[in-house]
Image: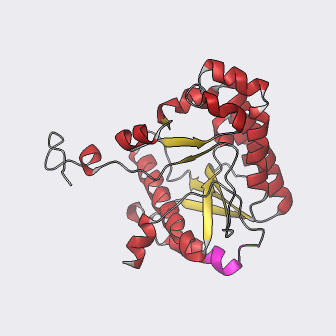
């Protein structure tokens, strides 16, 4: 039951970590739980880079911050993910997916529902929100004592073939093991996603990590120990709702939703 309770209590960390280094013991334990994940024919296609070097973290942070600024400034972020934004608890309760935007800077609060419209984007530019969010993102990554890069072996990872699916499935299982384990260690984890949205920034991270030609960089995460009290970021959201069984589970065929 401890394992199940831990999985149900899983969180993503949107705020800062403590500055304490992540112990080598905990780093290796996370690698062991990743290693325990299932993979097709026990191929274990995943590879990991544990990043503690402050200069490297600072450079990844700068790329992440610049990526965020560009995505917000250009409206690309909102165009791609607008379908997941919820603005009221009622809307969240009905849909039970996406993210509830419930924390905004004071000047934007009167425009909550319009904040991601073209007019709202113009206002955010005028208020300097893209640069502020970019700097917030940079600080979050820069203040993380550990980054984790996840790669796949291209000998196994062949997109368009079944091996591509099997490799991504195995990587997902390995990362889910890590995600579920960090809570037991008093740690948090968050996906550093913005560089992936802009190809030149993602390439810059690959160059920084000296990724060889036989590996594919798939994702970067930030990890650290959780502080006792966390201030919320400038723009933040809640996403604890999950779909009801009848919204994602069927019985026998896809025509019969499962009931609670």
Residue 36 visible here: yes
Query: Which quadrant of the figure contains the N terminus?
Result: bottom left
Q: How is the image coloured?
A: secondary structure
Q: Quadrant of residue 40?
A: bottom left
- Where residue 194 sits: x, y (%)? 66, 41
Residue with the most extreme right position: 55
In the rendered structure, the answer to whether residue 54 lies left or right of residue 3 reads: right
Please say whether residue 22 is one of the residues in the magenta stretch. yes
Residue nearest the viewer, comparing 201 with 132 = 132
- Where residue 204 sits: x, y (%)? 76, 42
Number of numbered labels in the structure image: 0
Q: Which residues are magenta?
A: 21-28
Please say whether residue 34 is one of the residues in the magenta stretch. no
Vertically, is 145 above or below 28?
A: above
> What secondary structure do most residues of the magenta stretch adopt?
helix
Residue nearest the viewer, comparing 41 with 73 = 73
Q: Residue at the spot x=41%, y=43% of the render?
A: 97
Residue nearest the viewer, comparing 16 with 155 = 16
Residue nearest the viewer, comparing 21 with 44 = 21
Vertically, is 203 above or below 8?
A: above
Query: Which quadrant of the figure contains the C terminus?
Result: bottom left
- Where residue 59 sits: x, y (%)? 82, 50
- Where residue 258 sits: x, y (%)? 19, 50
Vertically, is 66 above or below 251?
A: above
Residue 209 visible here: no
Q: Residue at the spot x=46%, y=66% of the render?
A: 9
In the rendered structure, the answer to whether residue 78 lies left or right of residue 65 reads: left
Q: Residue at the spot x=50%, y=43% of the render?
A: 99
In the rendered structure, the answer to whether residue 129 lies left or right of residue 150 reads: right
């Amino acid at each position: 039951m401890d394992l199940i309770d831990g999985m149900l209590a899983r969180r993503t960390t949107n705020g800062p970590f403590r500055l304490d280094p992540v112990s080598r013991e905990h780093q290796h334990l996370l690698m062991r739980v990743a290693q325990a994940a299932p993979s097709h024919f026990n191929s274990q296609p995943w590879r990991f880079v544990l990043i503690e070097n402050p200069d490297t973290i600072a450079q990844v942070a700068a790329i992440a911050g610049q990526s965020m600024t560009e995505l917000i400034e250009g409206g690309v972020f909102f165009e791609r993910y607008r379908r997941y934004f919820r603005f009221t608890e009622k809307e969240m309760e009905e849909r039970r997916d996406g993210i509830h935007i419930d924390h905004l800077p004071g000047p934007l609060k009167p425009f909550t529902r319009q904040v991601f419209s073209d007019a709202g984007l113009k206002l955010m530019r005028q208020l300097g929100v893209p640069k502020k969010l970019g700097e917030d993102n940079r600080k979050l990554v820069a203040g993380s004592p550990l980054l984790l890069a996840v790669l796949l072996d291209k000998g196994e990872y062949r997109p368009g073939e079944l091996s591509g699916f099997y490799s991504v499935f195995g990587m997902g299982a390995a990362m889910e093991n890590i995600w579920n384990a960090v809570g037991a260690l008093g740690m948090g984890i968050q996906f550093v996603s913005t560089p992936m949205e802009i190809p030149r920034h993602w390439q810059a991270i690959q160059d920084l990590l000296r990724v060889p030609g036989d590996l594919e960089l798939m994702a970067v995460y930030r990890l650290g120990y959780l502080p006792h009290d966390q201030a919320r970021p400038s723009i933040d959201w809640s996403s604890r709702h999950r779909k009801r069984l009848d919204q994602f589970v069927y019985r026998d065929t896809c025509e019969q939703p499962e009931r609670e």
